């Protein structure tokens, strides 16, 4: 089933990140997958949907509400599931080239070449570049560069994809509530471009991001049925310049997806397993408000104790007759989040490793490995009365993994005395996170 997401971009050309809601749930909690492989990072939590050139895809699956147990991985699927599917590689040599332009100095150039290598193997290579001036005032929303490579061997049931994306974009300045009440005056209120010694200079508010993903999948026969194994690896590097701060997210993930589909009597049965190791590191440096952007210590310093991991098996079954359809399934998610150490902000070492080695841990700032578990059932029935009328009922649970980092930052800065209040109550950060759990959301 294809449904739509109520979403908006900050520009007319799709260069900025998506913000939206589906059934009232923020799009940061949407599970976005490329050929069934999850895509996500932190700060903020959730998918990085703007890293793909949609001209390479034949269709986009979107599911929301009561979804099947087999659907949706990553940090959670409570906001629904999106799965992107590459356009099939042509059996004949073909090219697709386009150039477009528009207002605000927008331009985009796209090229895709499909070619067979021999009778069994074929490949496509795609590249694109796009950019636009920021419609509000100063700076650009790009330049964004995309490279995609795909390979298929139909006889061996082998497919492989590689994605590379880079983008540098200036940030939009948000409006306060008071400013938003007078849009005729403040509609294009933005950062200034006259004084580069001030934190609100426009070039001190931008993001430099890069994303790489590789995946390879192999289909084969097993247990008198169809099986597939897929391995993937991804790397995300996001550097956000925020006035007198520079926030870095360095994310690495490797994983495997196994699936099996079989028919037993009149039942279609699918089972599978998703497993992943992730290293998602985040830290915020203090920098000078000068063109040199000299390091001046740390605003937020944290070290993870190794990798976090996910193991998630599932099974799903369906039965269909002329008038009746039944489906049911069960997914299990076991998420181990690696421990953390939170350091005091007064550390003056600009190198991350030196800062960690010479740093002092914040009082109550040591967190142990924490394991979260959840079972996610789904169930649905559908009965066809006539050509135009159906009765149906569907129920499922979706999930959302806990997210530490916003709470970390507030604790580190002792915002509203939160650090003092926790310590004075005889608790630590470890006690707080041990009390958290994966959130389940029921849909009918």
Image: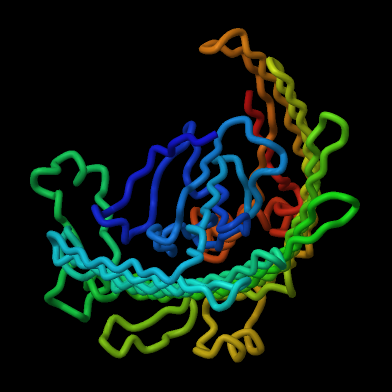
- Up-down relation of residue 162 to residue 54 (above or below): below
Q: Who is closer to the viewer here, 193 or 197? A: 193
Q: Who is closer to the viewer here, 282 or 258? A: 258
In the drawing, does residue 140 fall left or right of residue 403? left
In the drawing, does residue 27 fall left or right of residue 183? right
Instruction: Tell me the quarter of the picture where residue 292 sits.
Output: bottom left
In the drawing, does residue 303 fall left or right of residue 319? left
Observer able to see residue 178: yes
Q: Residue furthest front?
A: 119
- Up-down relation of residue 262 to residue 307 (above or below): above
Q: Position of residue 263 (x, y in %)?
A: 82, 39
Q: Residue at x 77, y 49 (%)?
A: 333
Q: Residue at x 26, y 87 (%)?
A: 291
Observer able to see residue 363: no
Q: Who is closer to the viewer here, 204 or 345? A: 204
Q: Residue furthest right?
A: 223
Q: Residue furthest left?
A: 185
Q: Residue at x 41, y 87 (%)?
A: 295
- Up-down relation of residue 309 to residue 144 (above or below): above
Count the marks: how many? 0
Q: Quadrant of the N terminus?
A: top right
Q: Residue at x 58, y 9 (%)?
A: 386
Q: Quadrant of the C terminus?
A: top right
Q: Position of residue 93 (x, y in %)?
A: 43, 71
Q: Position of residue 420 (x, y in %)?
A: 60, 58
Instruction: Tell me the quarter of the picture where residue 325 sits.
Output: top right
Q: Position of residue 378 (x, y in %)?
A: 73, 31
């Amino acid at each position: 089933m294809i449904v739509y997401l109520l979403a908006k971009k900050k520009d007319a050309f799709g260069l900025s990140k998506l913000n939206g809601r589906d059934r009232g749930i923020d799009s940061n909690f949407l599970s976005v997958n490329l050929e069934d492989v999850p895509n996500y990072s932190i700060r903020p939590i959730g998918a990085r949907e703007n890293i793909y050139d949609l001209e390479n895809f034949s269709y986009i699956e979107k599911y929301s509400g009561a979804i099947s147990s087999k659907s949706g991985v990553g940090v959670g699927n409570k906001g629904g599931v999106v799965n992107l599917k590459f356009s099939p590689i042509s059996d004949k040599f073909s090219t697709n080239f386009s150039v477009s332009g528009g207002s605000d100095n927008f331009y985009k150039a796209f090229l895709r070449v499909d070619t067979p290598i021999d009778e069994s193997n074929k490949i496509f290579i795609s590249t694109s570049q796009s950019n636009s001036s920021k419609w509000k005032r100063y700076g650009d929303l790009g330049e964004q560069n995309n490279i995609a490579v795909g390979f298929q061997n139909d006889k061996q049931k082998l497919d492989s994809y590689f994605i590379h994306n880079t983008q540098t974009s200036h940030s939009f300045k948000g409006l306060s509530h008071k400013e938003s009440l007078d849009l005729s005056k403040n509609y294009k209120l933005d950062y200034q471009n006259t004084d580069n010694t001030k934190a609100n200079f426009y070039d001190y508010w931008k993001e430099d991001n890069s994303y790489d993903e590789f995946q390879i999948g192999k289909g084969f026969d097993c247990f008198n049925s169809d099986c597939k194994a897929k391995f993937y690896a991804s790397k995300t590097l996001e550097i956000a310049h925020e006035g007198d701060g520079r926030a870095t997210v360095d994310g690495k993930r490797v994983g495997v997806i196994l699936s099996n589909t079989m028919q037993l009597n009149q039942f279609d049965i699918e089972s599978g397993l998703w497993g992943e190791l992730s290293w998602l590191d985040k830290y915020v440096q203090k920098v000078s408000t000068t063109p040199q952007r000299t390091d001046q210590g740390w605003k937020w310093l944290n070290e993870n104790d190794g990798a976090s991991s996910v193991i998630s098996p599932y099974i799903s079954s369906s039965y269909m007759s002329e008038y009746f359809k039944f489906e049911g399934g069960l997914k299990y998610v076991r998420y181990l989040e690696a421990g953390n150490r939170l350091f005091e902000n007064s550390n003056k070492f600009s190198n991350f490793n030196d800062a960690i080695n010479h740093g002092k841990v914040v009082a109550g700032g040591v967190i142990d490995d924490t394991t979260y578990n959840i079972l996610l059932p789904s169930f649905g029935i559908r009965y066809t009365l006539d050509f135009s009328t159906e009765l149906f009922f569907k129920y499922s649970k979706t999930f959302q993994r806990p997210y530490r980092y916003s709470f970390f930052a507030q604790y580190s800065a002792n915002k509203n005395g939160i650090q003092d209040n926790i310590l004075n109550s005889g608790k630590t950060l470890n006690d707080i996170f041990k009390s958290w759990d994966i959130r389940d959301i029921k849909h009918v």
